[in-house]
Amino acid sequence: MPVSLPPVKRLHDILPEEPLLMMGAGPVPIPAPVAAANGIVINHLGDTMSRVLEQVKTMGRYIFQTETPWLMGVAGPGSAAMEMAVINLVSSGDRVLSVCNGFFSSRLSEMAHRVGGEVERLTVADGHSADPEQIRAAMQRFKPRVITLVQGETSNTTCNVHLPEIAKIAREHDCLVIVDAVCTLSTMPLPMDEWGIDAVITGGQKGLSCIPGISLVAFSERAWECINNRPQPVAHWTLDATLATNFWHKASYHYTAPVSGLLALHEAMRLVCDETLEARYQRHRQCSNALQGAIETLGLTLYVPEAARLNSVVGIALPESLTSAQVCQHISHHYRVEIAGSFGPPIVRIGQMGEQCRAHNLFRGLHALGSTFKDLGVKVDVPAAMAELENQLQNQRQHSL
Ligand SMILES: *Cc1c(COP(=O)(O)O)cnc(C)c1O
């Protein structure tokens, strides 16, 4: 019997009539030039692509703040870039210290384990940044060859604010540093060379405000030397960083690159460069702070204390009467705003990455959030919160003039 086709709808009939405002933990809204570039297909090899790649590498070195030539893209999610960093730098039997703040940093430890690394997990309690002295002690005792950690743990909205000290300690112990900056790159400072980081990972759909499915990874010279001296080639052909240089450095074929995604990434990176890193960091800091203040004015509680709080994704503690699914469904159906639940803690999360950090999106998002809690029976002060958001943004505008 041939397989018959059940009824299939047009995409148009499935998508919401009016696009939802993406204020979750990614993907985030994309600017028009990024969307336009994503609609173009060009030859994956040849002069035009070479010029695009040169610019992506040049802009990447600015955005990652590094002189390394070993910056390259990956066809795949942020997780593919994580895997590319881990499997190229960790060989079977290597000791790996994995700082686990939550869901994504634990994913790095799982990846290191799967390639045969001897992994020690240093678990950090929710609401805290990893402690450099604890890491120093683990370095002295365990003597890892590689340490993995996140800059921002999107899942529970904590930030590893001591990352520079941790990277310094790792270097003193001759240990390679892999940092996941998927949600933080271009939203807050991460000077790769100055902090001595050996592999920085990012994805398209968060801080960079690009599409999902195209990612970047940068290896330091020190990391590259280790890759060149591997006892064996990596087991994953597609994620082999040495093979990836065929495409990224020698204008030849590794696999067919996601050309539209690369063009979109080019445009997303160009917008970051046009804005400048300093202005972009400031915009993120100001918008996120204003939103945090306004959420507290609503009468809600932020999940992470200020000292360890991530700005790129804001976590809001839920009253016991509500589940994150209830809140997310209500805000989506009634206000056409998407926010994120969580993997674990009883919170909902609002993203402050790239295009999410715009005053008009903040006002719409905050109004939707406040109204949702009110609709669901939580006592919140929506007008006061809206006024607080306006006041904070206005103060900041005055200060930055
Ligand atoms: C989203 C995220 C990832 C995973 O990215 P995917 O594109 O979903 O694979 C990894 N790390 C952090 C910190 C993230 O925020």
Image: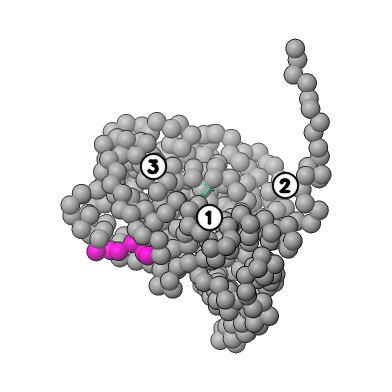
Residue at the spot of label 3: 110
Q: Nearer the viewer, residue 126 or 393?
A: 126
Image quarter (top left, top right, bottom left or bottom right) of the C terminus: bottom right
Q: Position of residue 35 (x, y in %)?
A: 70, 53
Distance from mark 1 CB to nearest ligand 1 atom below 8 Å: no
Dominant SS of magenta comes to loop
Image disc number at residue 315: none
Q: What are the residue bounds of the magenta stretch?
A: 128-133
Which residue, given by chain and number where applicable, does mark 1 sit on?
A: 342
Report which quarter residue 159 is drawn in.
bottom left
Residue 263, x across and y down, in percent: 64, 49
Circle 1: element type: loop
Magenta stretch holds residue 376: no
| Three-letter amino acid code at the position of disc 1 | Ser
Please give the residue where the numbered disc 2 appears in the rendered image: 39
**The residue under label 3 is which amino acid type?**
Glu
